Image: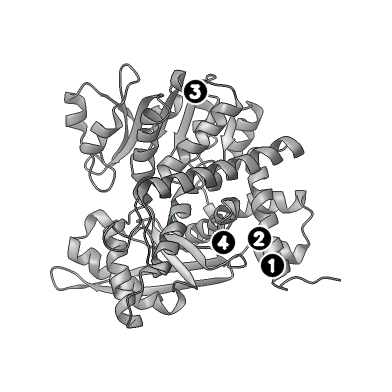
Amino acid sequence: MTKPINAFKMAQGQFDHVAELLDLEPYVAKMLREPQREYKCQIPVRMHDNTIQVFYGYRVQHNDARGPLKGGIRFHPSETLDTIRALSMWMTWKCAVADIPLGGSKGGVAVDPATLTESEKERLCRGWIDKFWNVIGPHQDVPAPDVGTNPQMMGWMMDEYSKIAREYTPGVITGKPVGGGGSLGRTEATGFGVIYTVREALKHLKMDPEKTTVAIQGFGNVAQYAAIGFVEQLKGKVACVSCWDRKDKQAHTISHPQNNVDPRFLQSITDQYGTIDKDKAIQAGYIIEDGDAWISKDVDILIPAALEGQVNDQTVQKISDRVKIIAEGANGPTTPEADEVLKRNNIFLIPDFLCNAGGVTVSYFESVQNNMNYYWTRDEVLSRLNQKMTQAFKSVLQLTEQEKVYTRDAAYMVAIGRVVKAMELRGWLYIP
Ligand code: GLU
């Protein structure tokens, strides 16, 4: 049996290991291994049948040494304070490794958004802002979409905040719809960012992208655009994707018999929560396998782009000898036990907070555009994203080679070093 994972313990374990390597002062490590501030609120919402349901909402602010806090809001039924704590910590490292001047935070609501009507969803989004408006703001803490939330929801939240602030404040939240204060390129940013790092890893390993095949876990926003980017930009092949099927209440792997998934076709038969219409996929010649099948595929690259803990002590055993790269599109997909196996097997890992930093990077560009009220073209956004991701990858690779450490540790070293530097420069640290 796979042990249930506590994402916060996992994030702290990863941090403690690198804090030791860096010989961080114990009080500095203490400041960084916990969030600076945490908020939990009740959010009562009037439902369509006129009853009131009470939801629980969270915002956790990990560290703002490098700039305003930044991080998404998840709507997920198993959301807890501990998952949000972990995710807020990873946001600090993500912004630092991407070298964008922001800190790390995260929010959420314990709810399955697919069970809500559109107007219940809107009231819950507005309710979240009514409870947390006084701890967020364009120069304090800027939320964004994540699992279970989307641009329309960000639009409602921005509107609610603007009403309370009594001025149009698009910079309070990112990932808004284009035309409603959003940035071109934000929707595809995380998935494309994953592919920019995969491209760099392939270059480093001297592998020809056109001869590589990938298996992807998940088919939400990140996985969809990672698949599209892999096929259209790198000209590689996608063997399969997986998705959670709400009707069947289980995950499925959707494979193509010739390893030739057409991601745009699959996207056209996928609902807003990432569930692919299985019957339409079968009609088009795809094969439906069980949810874990993606990880045992005979491919060169694996991209876990779903939730935490998916590459664990059990599933890691199923990885084929052919796999050379794991690109973590999700946050926290690999457990510490699985990390040990990947290290032993010499699999090149692109760690989550580097690999999926494209979303927050374009979120940062969105807030810059909002704050100056001047908008860029999609090409401008994506080429700046490409530069940032390539630079971030190179700084991590350089440290990996220089210090002969695991890529995850190197990414932590880059990120922690930058955050500690900012704390020092702001006078938060004791200088003897
Ligand atoms: N939720 C995304 C992440 O985990 C994006 C955060 C943002 O855009 O602020 O990176």
How many marks overall?
A: 4
The Cα atoms of the two marked residues, 4 and 1, are separated by 13 Å
Residue behind mark 3: 300
Q: Quadrant of the C terminus?
A: bottom right
Q: Residue at x 59, y 41 (%)?
A: 393
Q: Which residue is identified by label 4?
A: 101
Instruction: Using residue 388 as the reference point, say whether residue 279 is left or right of it.
Output: left
Of callouts 4 and 3, which one flags the residue occurring earlier in the amino acid sequence? 4
Q: State how far apart marks 2 and 3 are (Cα).
A: 34 Å
Residue 417: horizontal and vertical position, in percent?
Answer: 70, 55
In the rendered view, tell whether residue 421 sits above or below residue 269: below
Rendering coords of residue 180 (x, y %): 27, 63
Please tell me whether residue 168 is drawn above or below residue 11 in the rendered image. Answer: below
Instruction: Give the alpha-carbon distance from disc 1 to disc 2, as whole Å.
Output: 6 Å
Residue 281 pos. (x, y %): 21, 29
Q: Residues within 10 Å of mark 2 (few under 14, many from 20)?
A: many
Residue type of the residue flagged with mark 3: Asp
Comes first in the chain, label 3 or label 1: 3
Of labels 2 and 3, earlier in sequence is 3
